[in-house]
Image (tube, rainbow, N blue to C red):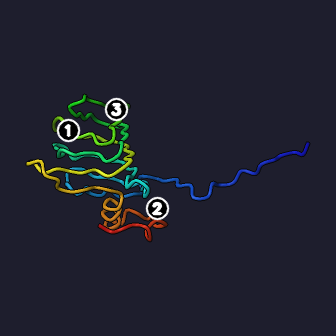
Amino acid sequence: MADLALEVKGAPGALMLKTDSIPWTDFPSGQTEFKLLHVHLQTGGSTYLVRNKPGANLPIHQHLGAVEVYTIQGEWSYQEGAVGPGDYSYEPHCVVHKPAGESDGFLLFVIQHGSTIFFSPDGTPDSILDCHRLYTRAKANNAVAHLKHLDHLMIER
């Protein structure tokens, strides 16, 4: 039998990030900031770090794809319950919710598997947040150098 020796090489296209080098960018609401880590063009979703500004009160919203959240620092809650450091949250496709109250601050790792619709206080759709809109905001803040290879695929919004 032949000797099957494998040579380990760097994976083509592997993305290894030093997140401290990515600037924080304001979300459209201005109440939170994010660091865009990756975009999911197939679903409109994205992977990012998010932190809120103390006293932020985010609007009611609906996820058009599941969302997975790992809480790194702080506490936050929806009507479904509260989570803190080390806790995981799974929000299913089409769930509609609003943060239960103001937060003193949090840092989250988020994998969003689709877009999000934000609603105005009267319940009408206000805006849609997808990977293209996050990319456009981050690009304007010089925070997408690690994603330049996707620039030609992004629709600026």
Q: Which one is closest to the eye, mark 3 or mark 1?
A: 1
- Location of residue 41 by image quarter: bottom left
Q: What distance separates the C-alpha of mark 3 from that of mark 2? A: 28 Å
Find the distance from the CA under tag 3 to the CA under tag 1. Answer: 17 Å
- Which badge, 1 or 2, is on the more N-terminal residue? 1
> Label for residue 64?
none
Left or right: 53, with 5 as reference point: left
Q: Secondary structure at mark 3?
A: loop
Q: Earlier in the sequence, mark 3 or mark 1?
A: 3
Q: Name the residue type under label 3.
A: Pro
Instruction: Name which residue lies at 13% across and 52% down.
Output: 124
Q: What amino acid is labelled 2 in the image?
A: His
Residue beneath the point at 46% across and 65% down: 150
Location of residue 16 in the rendering, given as x and y in whole percent from the top left corner: 52, 53
* Residue pointed to by mark 3: 85
Q: Residue 95 appears in which quarter of the rendering?
A: top left
Using the image as rendered, state which of residue 122 and residue 52 is in the foreground.
122
Report the residue that reaches farthest toward the top. 81
Which residue in the protein does label 2 denote? 146
Check the image and report above or below for 83 versus 127.
Answer: above
Query: Which residue carries the number 1 mark?
Result: 99
Q: Position of residue 59 (x, y in %)?
A: 17, 46
Of labels 1 and 2, the one closer to you: 1
Q: Quadrant of the C terminus?
A: bottom left
Residue 33 pos. (x, y %): 28, 52
Foreground residue, 138 or 80?
A: 80
The answer to whether one can see residue 91 in this image is yes
Q: Give the crowd class for mark 2: few <14, some 14-19, many >=20 residues within 10 Å.
A: some
* Mark 1 and mark 2: Cα distance apart in space: 31 Å
Q: Amino acid at mark 1?
A: Pro
